[in-house]
Amino acid sequence: MAGVRLKDLSKSFGAVEVLKGIDLTVEPHEFAVLLGPSGCGKSTTLRMLAGLEPATAGEIWIGERNVTNLEPRERDIAMVFQNYALYPHMTIAQNMGFGLKARKLPAAEIAERVKTAAEMLGITDLLGRRPRELSGGQQQRVAIGRAIVREPSLFLFDEPLSNLDAKLRVEMRTELLQLHRSLDATTVYVTHDQEEAMTMADRIVVMNKGRIEQIGSPSEIYFRPASLMVAGFIGSPAMNFVDGTVSDGKVGTPIGAISAPSLPGDGTKVTIGFRPDDFYFPDDLPEEETAATLSFSVRFVELLGARGIVTMRAGDTDFKAIFEERFLHRFEEGATVPLSLARDRLHLFLKETGERVAPDAA
Amino acid sequence: MTNTVGQSRLASLVVALVVALAIVVVLFPFLWIFLASIKPASVVALPDVWTFSPTARNWNDVLLGSDVPKNILNSLIVSVVTVSVALFTGAPAAYSFSRYKTGAGFRFTILAAEMMPPAILILPLFLILYQLGLIDSLMGVILAHLTFVVPVITWFLIGFFDDVPRELEDQAMIDGYTRFQAFYKVILPAIRPGIAAAAVFGFVLSWNDMFYALILTGGESKTLPVAIAGFWTFRGIDMGKMAVAILIAVVPILIVSFFIQKHLVRGLGGGAVKF
Amino acid sequence: MSLRYRLILPLTLLLAAVMAYPLVFSAWISLHDYRLTRLYDVRFRGLDNYLYIFGDAPFLKAMTNTLMFVAGAVSLELVLGLGLALLLQRLVRFQNFARAVLLAPMFITPIAVGLMFRFMLSSELGVIPHYLRLMGLGVDWFSADLALFSLMLIDAWQWTPFMLLMFLAGLEALPRSPFEAAKVDGASPWMTFWHVTLPMLRPVILVALIIRALDAFKVFEYVYAITRGGPGDATEVILFHIYKTGFRFFRMGEAAAMAFILIAITLVLVVILYSAMQRK
Ligand SMILES: Nc1ncnc2c1ncn2[C@@H]1O[C@H](COP(=O)(O)OP(=O)(O)OP(=O)(O)O)[C@@H](O)[C@H]1O
Ligand SMILES: [Mg+2]
């Protein structure tokens, strides 16, 4: 298995600059996920890694080889597409064996490898059928099977689960991860589904507008987002934000003063972020850990089962908080409720650049 | 939009009757010509004879004692060669138009070529073929038929290539093929139904042409439509034999065309009109 | 050369040989006094051929006949095709069978159609005039007054199916919701047709109309099979006239000039067609 290095990789379509200098290292055996909003360049990055799009500038290394100018077939990779891209005129077995045939393997070995892969994925019964006779989930398995028979040094996935229904999607996540581990593979996986990224990735690469915003483990990305963009993109419901100005060791905001550790100099404009799970009832939080206690007026409550999302107002901004069901009776519509924020749960960003200032990124 | 729900019985009946009438209008000429082909010579020219003892004589005469088998062979050769050449040149071009969105200029040229009136081409073609000594040869007709079959087939295939997802080609390249191999090993087979429909449609067009063939062929090289026209001249007609020849020209085409009906609209739209 | 252009190369070469070269040659012919009988004496005439045919009564008559034929036949086919498409949609049973049968005529060779109808409509041998006579209607279908109209009817028999094909596909592709909304609004079938179906079908109608018109300009076989331009010049259509001028009278120069005028008309229609298709 090989690692991947992208060095200052750029891509323009005509005058439009789609990727603006990507630097990324994926270690061997790692499951790396490219995550980001629609149009940020995830697919483009993956397609360049596959050799389907030429690089405008920069280098691509797979293992010890500089593959920047190699054709897809010379890169020893396998890719699974969102729409599966099964050959409609071939049987499932032929689909899976096609790449081996291209590499001129003997027919017996092709059959053997197809059979093994089919058993792994539980699709042995389907081998004689054609793609249109298969359900979406089955087609998905075939597409994955086609990738693993090749025994490539690198697996690429472009939103492979996004056409499946919710339940199947969750099942396939687990299965893909097991497959990744048992094959001891290196995987680069594109998705715009953050839950998928959080549950599957060894490392997440958050992209935005053709740049990398942050690279880190799922917990680093969640608990120490490196920028406003990452903070706002990861987590559902999204992180709450309020703008303010630093003065006297505190941040003055329209909804009240908030104290925070390691603040920048007085007068700096900052944005404070706190997740919906990070509200406390004032009694539950010791004084020294409290950043501020603010009052919110309740607008409405959405019950999600064991928990509920409370939408509340302070100043002229809406905030969302998550509480367990047994606390929800405290949030009657129109009521004013005091809630506290914990110092060590705050995220502080420079308003101007969106850069994280506190607490430190690691 | 199937809107049969809530339709009254009466309305359904009227619809059925009108459609039935249209079917009669369509089928009657075929029936009449079929009857003519098996009528004895004595009654074929009478407009109101419905009962007679059928004879196979016309069929015998045409199939065994006339040039028609030769004409059929000529027509077959012309159509098959024309369609083959058209597919070999048209399919790669159509793929390029579809895959690379190759300029509107090219597409327009293809459409314009498809619609070109034969009047403009027949004069120079005739003179060129005349100088090449190719008048009264199948080669000449084939060249003439290429002028309309090639653009039609090219235009026809664009739409089918448009329907192939880009990823199929990407996948083939990752599987180990060059772009061109991906085209002929994966994309072409994937649109086999479209290619078959285009081939049949081109075949029908070539098979049916009389204008070019009339001017460019003579004795030995006559195609079937020209031969059919020859049954009714100012010198007289042989209605029974003509009926046989017409049926021979028409029935096989009706059968093959049945299979392409559902692809026809996609093809005629040339990737531009999507229904 | 990139693959993109290599793929087009064979087509380009072929079309250059069988179309571009003849076109240029044709343009050259149209500027000369080019007679098949006097190939040793081809003279440059400039635009004289064009000037001549513009004052040439038979040519103008052929043009008029053709335009009338195209307008008449195509509008007939439009109305019949649209009507049949709407009816066929409402047919409860045998829809596929009816559709297959009704589309049949467009696939067969026009010369056969011409001869079949010549046979069936002929005054002496024809089955149709015979039964019309029994009903007290003496109609001579190929008389000077009626011949062009009869040819339009024959054209409609063969080509209404094309319109039907296009409209059936167009109707099938229409979204259902506007029709349901019209129903909820209490619109009568007639109103629905005028205000919902027709406007939504307009792009398809336009495309079908132009394709048919372009094709109808090429009418030849029916005339050749039945009337040979007669009686008199009643059914002399442009392609037949060019054929006669070039290959009966061997006046290639004039014939080529006529063809170029036809091309000009065709090109205008193709431009409209192309933009109609792109807009969709
Ligand atoms: N062939 C192309 N020509 C021009 N622009 C392109 C091309 N392919 C992609 N783009 C543009 O590049 C940008 C990035 O596209 P890309 O497909 O990589 O986004 P993505 O992150 O995969 O988004 P999504 O989540 O929607 O799949 C988009 O703005 C897109 O419009
Ligand atoms: Mg994408």
Image: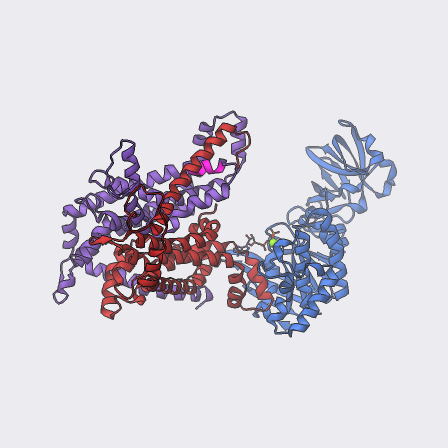
Question: In the image, what residue occupies the spot 79% across and 42% down?
Answer: A278
Secondary structure, magenta segment, majority class: helix
Q: Residue furthest top?
A: C186
| Segment colored magenta | C84-89
Displayed quadrant of residue B173: bottom right
Chain C in the picture: what colour?
purple
Vertical placement of residue A319 versus A210, above or below: above
Q: Point out the quarter of the image occupied by ligand 1.
A: bottom right
The question of residue C88 being in magenta is answered with yes
Please indicate, yes or no, whether residue A357 appears anywhere in the rendered image.
no
**In screen coordinates, is C59 left or right of A12?**
left
Vertical placement of residue C203 versus A68, above or below: above
Q: Nearer the viewer, residue C163 or C196?
A: C163
Chain A in the picture: what colour?
blue
Query: Residue A290: x and y, percent?
Result: 83, 41
**In screen coordinates, is C270 left or right of C59?**
right
- Judging by colour alone, the chain drawn in red in this rendered image is B
Q: Residue furthest front?
A: B53
Query: Residue C63: x and y, percent?
Result: 22, 45
**In screen coordinates, is C118 left or right of A161?**
left
Query: Residue B223: x and y, percent?
Result: 31, 61
The C terminus of chain C lies in which quarter of the figure? top left
Vertical placement of residue C154 versus A72, above or below: above
Please indicate, yes or no, whether residue C89 appears anywhere in the rendered image.
yes
Query: Residue C12: x and y, percent?
Result: 37, 64
Vertical placement of residue A220 versus A147, above or below: above
The N terminus of chain C lies in which quarter of the figure? bottom left
The question of residue A78 being in magenta is answered with no
Total of numbered circles in the picture? 0
**Colour mapping used in the image:** by chain
